[in-house]
Amino acid sequence: MKTSHPELNQLYVLSKQAPGPANAGLADQWRELALRDLPALTEWISEQPLDQECRLFEIYFALCLAEPLPQGFLSREFQRLYQLAVQVPSNANIYRQLEAFAVLNADEPGELVRNIVDCLLQGIQADSWQIRRFSAWLAGDFIGSCGSGLVDLLRQRCQQDPDWLVRFFAQQSLRHLAMDKPQHERPPPLSFADRLRIFLLGEPVADGEVFAATWSELYLFRPRLATFVRARH
């Protein structure tokens, strides 16, 4: 049974109506609410459906930039959503919420970054190609603070993963480390076949729908899935 939190419900409605991510005024209100009553926010947020109308990413985005950073809350939320994605990897809406964690400062000490990296280490090796795609993409934002384990896994996936989007996102993430590296330490190039796919379909956009797409959806040239570069990096 859902609990009643009129103030949270009203702010959430405003967040859905506001254009663009993380409206500054609304972001401040979410931060103030988290400081004032984090248990109520935790309870309320767990009751929100992860559907096309879901805009929990507004809250995560705001809190990822908060000072002090609510590490425990964000860590639990990331793990909760990540496990839901593992259970239902075809739900694109879950990935859309998780994308907000890319704004975190990866050098921030504490449990939050450690737990995200632990999830990514598992996710890059998951059976689900959707989880591997998302994990390979998000890894780029944490690759500088995670040691060699994540880098080694990304190099393996860049060359050996059966899903071409995993290979692409792994290579893109490795490029975060490539700028000051000698040639032999840079990411392996994409194969000719992968470069041909990108030429025909356009460079993939990091988006929940792309992470969750099946092979048939990717090759139907749907406008949101096959588009030229609007890349985040």
Image (cartoon, helix red, strand yellow):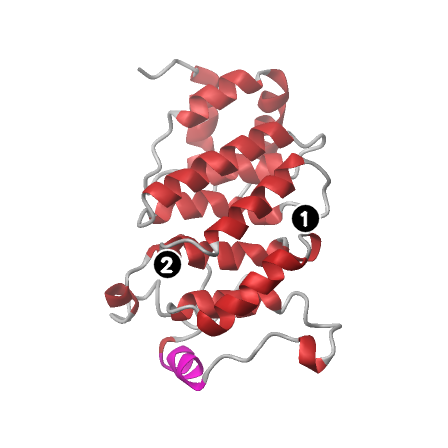
Q: Assign the magenta stretch its main secondary structure.
A: helix
The mark that comes first in sequence, 1 or 2, is 1
- Specify whether 25 is left or right of 163: right
**Is 194 one of the magenta-colored residues?**
yes
Q: What stretch is highlighted in magenta?
A: 192-200
**Residue 218, position in %: x, y?**
30, 67
- Specify whether 222 is left or right of 152: left
Q: Total marks drawn?
A: 2
Q: Distance between the residues labelled 1 and 2?
A: 25 Å
Q: In which quarter of the image is the C terminus?
A: bottom right
- Specify whether 102 is left or right of 198: right
Q: Residue 106 carries which label?
A: 1
Q: Badge 2 local density, few (<14 within 10 Å), some, or many (20+)?
A: many
Image quadrant assignment for residue 75: top right
Q: Is residue 81 above or below residue 42?
A: below
In the image, farthest residue toward the bottom:
192
Nearest the viewer among 24 and 126 is: 126
* Residue bearing the label numbered 2: 129
**Is 57 one of the magenta-colored residues?**
no
Q: In which quarter of the image is the N terminus?
A: top left
**Residue 172, position in %: x, y?**
55, 68
Secondary structure of the residue carrying numbered label 1: loop
Q: In this view, does 44 lie above or below 209?
A: above
